[in-house]
Amino acid sequence: MEHTNANISSVGHHLSHAAAGFQTSPFDEATVVVIDAIGESDTVSIYQCHYNGACMAGEKAKAHYNRVYHQTYPHSIGMFYSAVTKRCGLNPMDEEYITMGMAAYGDAEKAYTTLRNAVIDDMDGPRFKHNLHIGLDEDLTFLADVTVEDIAAAGQQLCEEMIRDVMLRARELTDSTNLVYMGGVALNCVANSCLGEYFDNIWIMPNPGDAGSSLGAAAYEYGREIRFNTPFLGTNIPGKYPVNNLITELLEKKIVGVANGKAEFGPRALGNRSLLADPRGKKIKDQVNEIKRRQKFRPFAPVILEEHVDQYFDMPVNQPTSRYMQVVATCRYPKRYPAIVHIDGTSRVQTVPADNSGIRKLLEAWYKETGCPMLLNTSLNIRGEPMVDTRADADRFEKEYGVKVIS
């Protein structure tokens, strides 16, 4: 076989996160913040980013990244949260999202002071007294007299405080009111809800964790803007979105799966590989959790017609929409929609704009049929398993778990 020489270049971990975010964003210039567990040695990075040089052939010039601050291992917000996750009896580097949901059931005050005094060092930036790498060296055993829910609540509160400190630093060191936020910690949608207090415009690419880094490395080498018009970039199950069949099943059985079109890029099910349900039923949440083999306390998200969101949810400051399930909002009518409201009265909202997507057409039909502009939307998978990707996966899901999956 004849081989050709190829130029191979490498891109740093945090720089790949930054490029994946900035070059898919709608901004010409922005502050980019990256927070994760660790990349090489960096755990927090702040960049001032813009496109520089002359435009050629109608394309934007090359993206420029000026790093103005970074924090390094072992001082890591992401590792801290993973240590808390392990102490709560969950799998670190995997089930941090469960810790986030568990936190709403706890009393942060019962564990906050002990946790903060034991691990936080009040020096410059988020710094820790111990190596908290996923709890292997320091597993927080000193928190023996409180519940895991209290520990989760205190850990979440401390995480939010440290993220706020990073965002304040980012505002001080840069002159942009546009924020691009990336890294695995950017998946903490509860913490994300405060970002509008510091920035006017916010973009979190729908795959901000390590799974999106390949796009970031390619984007950095490409150098120019990437028009990110849709998160539906994966495996295709062809056919027209089955709106009528889904409506029929929802009206009769209240719960149905859909596997149609291209799979979502990122960890959120956004309507093409989703388990959908009527959000109004009192027993729906428990039924869906039972199907997915999840803990009963776990919340579910609503997907709603974007023009109706303000009627049903108090959206965070400067974040009036949430097209990729990236923030939480207080539900105005929690008793009407118990299936999509967490114990603290909030919901991780997904808003759907007036586009041509299948989930948009389904919501329009559902609203016309029921007067309800939203559905419960969760990923079409079972806890611990990957999401349904192909029609064969959908057939297996339908057979094993007794839920009709329509393509």
Image (spheres, rainbow, N blue to C red):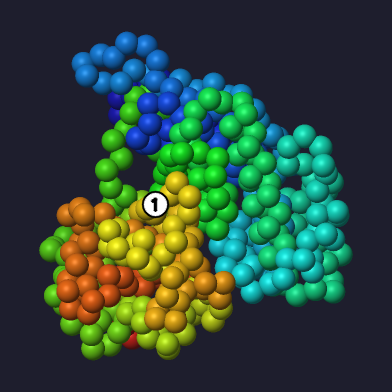
Residue 272 visible here: no
Residue 232 place in picture, x, y as percent: 28, 52
Identify residue type, mark 1: Pro
Q: Quadrant of residue 372?
A: bottom left
Residue 142 point in image, percent of width and height: 86, 64
User: Residue 328: image x %, image y %?
Assistant: 49, 60
**Mark 1 burial class by Cα count in 10 Å: few <14, some 14-19, many 20+:** some
Q: Which residue of the protein is positioned furthest toward the top in this rendering?
A: 54
Residue 1 x/y as whole percent: 30, 29
Q: Please give left or right for residue 169 compared with residue 16 in the image.
A: right
- Give the residue drawn at x 81%, y 37%: 123
| 208 in relation to 95, above or below | above
Using the image as rendered, state which of residue 112 and residue 237 is in the foreground. 112
Indicate left or right for 337 with 111 as reference: left
At mark 1, the secondary structure is loop
- Label 1 sits on residue: 320
